[in-house]
Image (cartoon, rainbow, N blue to C red):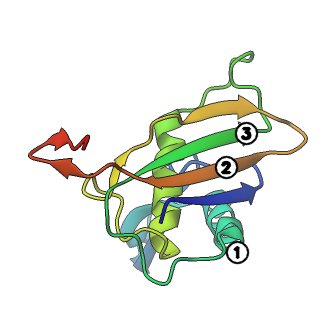
Amino acid sequence: MKELKYVVYGDPRTKKNSQTIAGSGPRCPECHKPKKQWIRQGKANDKWAELAGWQLRPKPRRPIDFRVNIRYRFFTKIDYINTKAKIDQSNLVEAMNDILVDQGIILDDNIRIVAGTDGTRVYHDKDNPRVEICITRMPEEENGQMKLF
């Protein structure tokens, strides 16, 4: 694999900005909250992950299990640079890495596989929000140093 490219159309979402509280079990008679509660990803993130999953094609025969750099170019509807609205690039990357794992494109998003996200940027495109993804294999490393020859 020299390079793998994808484009996911839609306004990118982070997991941290769309959380909700879920619960199960008997409810408290006073506050009516379920006995067991946990934080889960909200519907906006679920919809984004499903939308992305349909667009991440073709998938490799087996998940990538070697060191790669994943360059993301996020194009958002909101102009985060020239407005007071804020978004963290690292949260966008984390959400997309998790989607790539869930879709079987990469085996895991730990540093043994995702060695870097060099070249990742966030841009504004209100008419065509999307994420451009470029996955490239890292140069072979030997004893912690790059092998040049």
Q: Which mark is residue 22?
A: none
Query: Which residue is situated farthest in the right direction here?
Result: 127
**Label 1 SS:** helix
Answer with left or right where residue 113 lies relative to residue 129: left
Q: Amino acid at mark 1?
A: Trp
Q: Answer yes or no: do the residues labelled 2 and 3 have beta carbons within 8 Å?
A: yes
Q: Residue at position x 36%, y 71% from top? A: 107
Q: Report, in whole angstroms, how far the alpha carbon at label 2 lies from the one at label 3.
A: 8 Å
Would you place residue 64 above or below residue 71 in this image? below
Q: Which residue is mark 3?
A: 75
Q: Amino acid at mark 2?
A: Glu
Would you place residue 81 above or below residue 112 in this image? above
Q: Which residue is mark 1?
A: 54
Q: Earlier in the sequence, mark 2 or mark 3?
A: 3
Residue in front for this viewpoint, 35 or 141: 141
User: Where does residue 127 sit, x and y in percent of width and height?
Assistant: 91, 41
Q: Earlier in the sequence, mark 2 or mark 1?
A: 1
Q: Which residue is mark 2?
A: 132
Mark 2 Cα-neighbour bin, 10 Å: few <14, some 14–19, many ≥20 = some
Q: Residue at position x 48%, y 49% from top? A: 70
Q: Residue at position x 70%, y 31% from top? A: 123
